Amino acid sequence: MRWSFECTMETLTDREAYLRGSRAAASGNYAKALQFFRLAAEHGYADAQNAIGTFYALGRGVGKDAAAAVHWYTPAAQQGCAAAQYNLALALANGSGTKADLTAAFRWYSLAAEAGHAGAQNNLGLFYLDGSGVDADFARAAELFSASARQGNAQAQCNLGDLYALGKGTEQDFAAAAELYHASAAQGYGKAVSRLGELFECGLGVPINLWTAEAYYRRAKQLGYINTAPYLKRVRDSIKEAEDAYTQGLALLHSEPSQSERAAALLREAADVGHAEAMLQLGRIYYASGDYSRAVPFLRSALTAGQSTAGFLLGTCAEKGLGCEPDAAQALRYYREAARKDLDAQYRLGLMYRDGIGTTANAATAAVWFKRAAAGGHAGAQQALNSL
């Protein structure tokens, strides 16, 4: 049986041997994978040589041996294998299995980057960013990070975000930084998650929101980004101050109506750092006083922050043009947001579908909304339902 297996191996082309090795590796059979890789590597097949180097670096099917990894990476890199060039550069940069040599690492990273290797583009960008073995050049770093980020490299996305946030090598643009951090964070890169926390804590490129910032810091810590510990403490202290301001403002509003201005100031203090309930209360205060142009922004912020009941007042404003341009279709959308909890919003939706306001008239849909509101005890909805 062994003789048959060896004969089969000898009849394979180098590419076929490499592909079979790759399939074996994917299934976790590293010993078999090495056999196929060695067959191709001994004939100079670069991808197989790089694969063997990776096995030695990771200890797959063999004991970990950084020097052996470099031994196999080198001929593959010399043949132009971008992955091997990257791996060899990484070993040279870190002094793993060979003497550290930043100049040689820079050269191999450059070759791999020119071939489009995302990891090499990112790491070469770091050389230009830090001025390691080359003159610092933020613009060149930004170009390399951008090329890598377009390929989905999470580290490069975060690094490019940092340059946008700092205005180095590119125009300062916190919104662009936030977009890049989001892309990187979606891949579980802890540093980018922490960076999002910083943006939301300070309101840079995104609306300030201490609660969102805290959530990002906690997530970054879970991912092992330990630098978030002091940030977590700081943001939690700020959240406590905001919660205290909200509690005091709400109590003052209900107990001493004459102190409404002081109450509003305390609520604004909380709302300004993302306190959703404070935003809703302020929107209600200004709406009740007829100051619709001030009510609408707070109500919109509250709705965005998850306070769906803000949608009813926003729908009323949009429908009647209070503090904003009249927009029946937008009013319909706001009412839908509120209708999950608000009987009045359900009733208004029924009326709009019945009368074709902001949408095509639809008696069946109107009846659905009237029934929901009536089931919750809304008297007007039951009357409207009876008259359909």
Image (cartoon, rainbow, N blue to C red):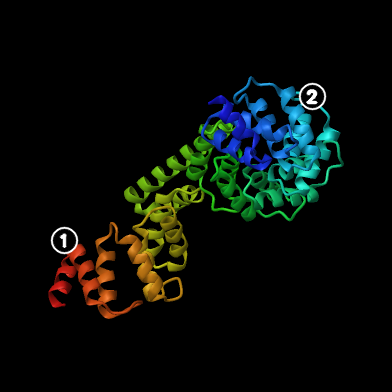
Look at the image and tell me whether residue 178 can be seen.
yes
352 sits to left or right of 77? left
Looking at the rendered image, the disc whose residue lies closer to the viewer, 2 or 1, is 2
Q: Is residue 374 above or below residue 26?
A: below
Estimate how packed mark 1 is, as few (under 14), some (14 to 19) or many (20 or more) residues with alpha carbons within 10 Å.
few
Foreground: 100 or 31? 31
For image coordinates 58% across by 49% down, the residue present is: 183
Foreground: 142 or 275? 142
Residue located farthest toward the left when viewing the structure as drawn:
386
Question: As shown in the figure, which amino acid type bears the numbered disc 1?
Answer: Ala
* Picture quadrant of residue 111: top right
Foreground: 272 or 350? 350
227 sits to left or right of 272? right
Foreground: 171 or 262? 171
Estimate how packed mark 2 is, as few (under 14), some (14 to 19) or many (20 or more) residues with alpha carbons within 10 Å.
some
* Picture quadrant of residue 372: bottom left
Question: As shown in the figure, which amino acid type bears the numbered disc 2?
Answer: Thr
